[in-house]
Every structure is written in structure tokens, then in C-alpha cells.
Amino acid sequence: MQEIKDSFRFNGIELTPELTGRPKVEADLVQTLASLFGWDGEARRILTCALAGALHVTTPQVSAVVNVLGVGANDDVTFSDQPCTEVMVLANPANSGDVWVNVGAAGAVDTGWPLDAGDHVEFSINNMTELQMRIISDGDKVIIIRTV
């Protein structure tokens, strides 16, 4: 049997009575808990399912829709500290040039993901500071949807 060395809380579930000491836990219970909870990098989250047993999956809530205008040729775009879970970047359908999108490094021609006019790409990131772009043509735009 394993012991619970450090008690921890699960968001959305109140444990009563609260765990004290080092209770023993059977391996099958540990496996069951592992299958009922997910880890998002910051906290344990309970997984929910439909009555038929199918895992309930939704998209995160939209936090913002942002339009970014390229100012000058080869405009490098970065973002301030804004927590997020996912972003979708759409090159405006009226753009005349490419947009290069990268995560964790500067976007540049042949560095990152190229977007032609009307193309889009989606990323799972934890903060907008990770997203970087280069808008090649002056006056071209990107539209960004970010979620929390």
C-alpha cells in the first residue's frame, strides 16, 4: 500500500473529514483517482462525463478577440503578460502578404508557421508572451482569439 504523504485539495470537491496524518491508499484507488482527475500544469482538475459515460469536453471560454495591424513592412509583433489556454490566429482575408507565427521565438520568413490571407492556426499556450509574429506587408492585419 502507498501512503498519502502530502494532502492536497481538488478544485470542486470538498473532502470531509479533511485528511490528516498519512493514510494508506490501495493501488487501485490511486489508479482510479488518476483517471478521474487531469493536470493542467497548475492544478488538478476533475474530469466530467455525460450520463452515457462519454468524457465531457468543451472549448475554453473566450477571453478576448484582438485585431493587430502591421505598421510598416516586416513588423514584429509581441504581446504583454496575459494568461491564456489557447489562441487562434487568423490572417485577415484582405491581406496582401504573409504573416509568420511562432511560439517561444521570433517569427520571421521561413521561421514559424506561414499564414496566407485567410489562413489560420491554433496553439495551446499558457501566456500570450509566448506568441510572436512577423507581419510582412504594411497595413496587413491578424485577428486573434484567446481563451482562459
Image (cartoon, grey):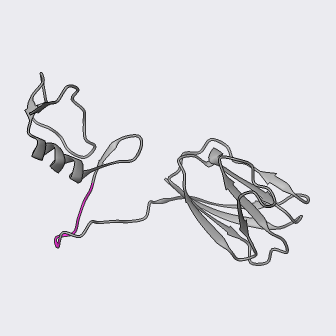
Q: How many marks?
A: 0
Pick the front one: 85 or 27: 27
Foreground of the two, 26 or 6: 26
Q: Position of residue 95 (x, y in %)?
A: 81, 74
Which of the image's four quarters has the N terminus?
top left
In-image side of 96 versus 116 (left or right)? right
Which residue is rendered at x = 29% and y = 66% of the image? 56
Instruction: Kindly identify the residue that appears in the image at 73 percent across and 66 percent down.
Output: 114
Q: Nearer the viewer, residue 28 or 57?
A: 28
On whether residue 48 falls in the magenta region, the answer is: yes
Task: Give the percent coordinates (x, y) of residue 42.
Answer: 40, 40
Which residues, given as a range, are shown in magenta? 47-52
Q: Is residue 50 magenta?
A: yes
Against 24, residue 109 (above or below) is below
In the rendered view, does 30 fall on the left or right side of 87? left
Q: Where is residue 140 shown, x and y percent of the image?
A: 82, 67
Give me the residue at 23% from left, 64% from top: 49
- The image shows residue 43, relative to residue 84, as above or below, that is above
Is residue 147 shown left or right of residue 109? Answer: left
Q: Position of residue 97 (x, y in %)?
A: 84, 71
Judged by its main secondary structure, the magenta piece is loop
Residue lying farthest to the top in this orientation:
21
